[in-house]
Image (cartoon, helix red, strand yellow):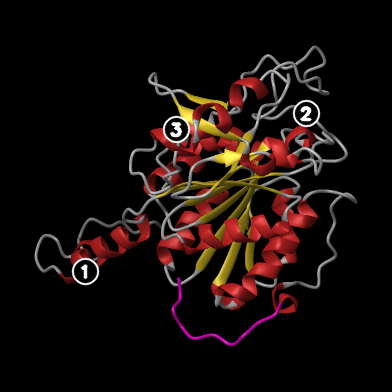
Amino acid sequence: MSNDTVQLTTKKDWTSDQEVRWCPGCGDYGILLAVQTLMPELGVKPENTVFVSGIGCSSRFPYYMETYGIHSIHGRAPALATGIAVARPDLDVWVVTGDGDALSIGGNHLIHALRRNVNLTILLFNNRIYGLTKGQYSPTSELGKVTKSTPMGSIDHPFNPLAVALGAEASFVARTHDLDRKHMMETFRAAHAHRGASFVEILQNCNVFNDDAFEPVTGRKNRSEMMIDLVHGEPIRFGVDGHAGVVMGADGRLRLVEVADVGVEALLVHDAHREDPSLAFALARLSSEANIAGGAWSPMPFGVFRNVERPNYGSMVGAQLAKASSTKGPGDLRDLLRSAGTWQVT
């Protein structure tokens, strides 16, 4: 990312002149506004910023940002973004994708960008449905989901996006939702500040094909009891007046408890910087079992699950290239490229 001093910008400087073409009421509008509002606060230049997307409703995002952008092909956004980030480490590279784009045809590209720790900020819009192609079930749709492509109900076990990212050893993993601009902005800010692969799942409503998919958790009247705010270094509490909390049993499993029954000292203290991803993985799965089959929802954690430092891919590639270019003899990259092992095709 560029360290050059930049002039102050405003939201207008980051907003393109293109008409925003999502369905009225789509959650994508809220995410776009959060990003456009945040960018002036990051101290970066529009001309040094790139948004890369794949295919899907969310993938129209680059059109609406006054930056460089690539609307690429289905699932390949992480691959294209990897090339940009490695070739131009001075740029801020963002990936905007959806649950279908990233976790179906693009699953392989996603996990390798994460495991390599490419310097990308990846925003995954999760609405548990294929919206652009008119309502087929997606890799995150719950068991039994009835759609145009699953008229008798889906029999596919759904992906947990955070668990997938953590399984790939992503160094930054977080979750937010489209109804809280402040929370989105703070989550995106933290993701952008991270040097390496940042993965943010955004629970996003598709009001046409999967309306109120997350209402039991993110609905205004439900948030206080259903959303668990993760804060590094603090006991994990939630609910009105923090009456509920999370503990870890002797078997390593996390459980929801009443604080009055166990005491504050028994609560699990969140450690986003823990090198071992097992705690973050357990938190990512805390609500998954109850939500897989479309039954009663259980409280769900939000915020930064994991934020650890490790070398990023672009820096390591750059170091190897610099070493190879400066080495004389058998390891000389320039000599290799100009060696006799070439052919002329006529």
Residue 303 x %, y %: 57, 48
Q: Amino acid at mark 2?
A: Gln
- Magenta: main secondary structure equals loop
In the image, which disc is placed on residue 325?
Answer: 1
Q: Amino acid at mark 3?
A: Ala
Quarter of the view holding residue 336? bottom left
- For mark 2, give the secondary structure: loop
Q: Give the magenta-colored segment's residue range.
A: 1-10
Q: Please give the name of the residue rendered at 17% of the width and 71% of the height, measured from the top-left corner.
A: 326
Kindly identify which residue carries mark 3.
266
Q: CA distance from mark 2 to mark 3?
A: 44 Å
Residue 5 is a magenta residue? yes
Q: Is residue 281 above or below residue 82?
A: above
In the image, which disc is placed on residue 171?
Answer: none
Kindly identify which residue carries mark 2.
136
Quarter of the view holding residue 274? top left
Res. 126 in view: no
Left or right of 343: which side holds 297?
Answer: right
